[in-house]
Amino acid sequence: MRKIRIKLLFLVIAITLSSCGFKLKGSYEIPYQTIYLQAAGESRVGRIIKRKIQRKSNIEIVQTLSAAEATINILEEVSTRAVAVLSNVGSVDEYELIYTVRYRIGQGQNSSSMQEGQIVLRRKITHSDLDIAAKSNEEDVLINDMASEAATGILVRLSRTKI
């Protein structure tokens, strides 16, 4: 009897979520066939956006602005680290990683439709003087994760710019 109630509860939740237009975070459908991506060669977000777009078989990244239906410009990408928690003796216990991406998206060459935005992501990371190499690797993994999240955010925003 209990199993039936649990299944019924999940069914009610599923129906409620589907009827209200619920979508998973980060889900997007890009309404363009061609996109011009402008980002510096070392841009993590630019590389991730390119990879995500190439996974969608019907979207082409073009080399010229005139051939594009939409544009994505990564203007600035900055990763910083700030002290978040100090111990009683004054040594650092925790850092806060701050990843900021400024971008501009729009439709083709039409500069009036360009929308500029900024994404700021924050993550905390503990610090240990004993595991410097491991903490450095962990920091790189967190920065890559934040870059991926920023790329998804930009693509979600692009998917909502179609007029």
Image (cartoon, rainbow, N blue to C red):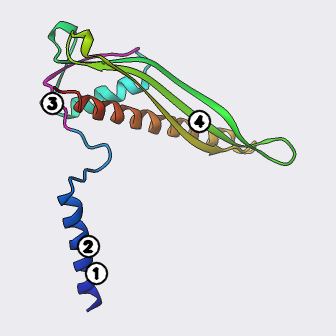
For label 4, the residue is 97
Find disc 3 in the rendering and name its residue: 31
* Magenta-tinted stretch: 29-40
Q: Earlier in the sequence, mark 3 or mark 2?
A: 2
Tell me the amino acid under the disc marked 2.
Answer: Phe
Query: Badge 2: how crowded within 10 Å, few (<14), some, or many (20+)?
Result: few
Q: Nearer the viewer, residue 140 or 20?
A: 20
In the image shown, does 99 or 48 lie closer to the viewer?
99
- Residue 22: x and y in percent read 24, 53
Q: Is residue 46 above or below residue 18?
A: above
**Residue named by callout 2:** 10
User: Relative to 108, is 49 on the left or the right?
Assistant: right
Up/down of 157 relative to 62, above or below: below
The residues bearing labels 2 and 1 have C-alpha atoms spaced at a distance of 6 Å
**Is the Cβ of the residue at disc 3 closer than 8 Å to that at disc 1?**
no
Report the amino acid beneath label 3. Answer: Pro
Q: Are marks 2 and 1 in contact (CB under 8 Å)?
A: yes
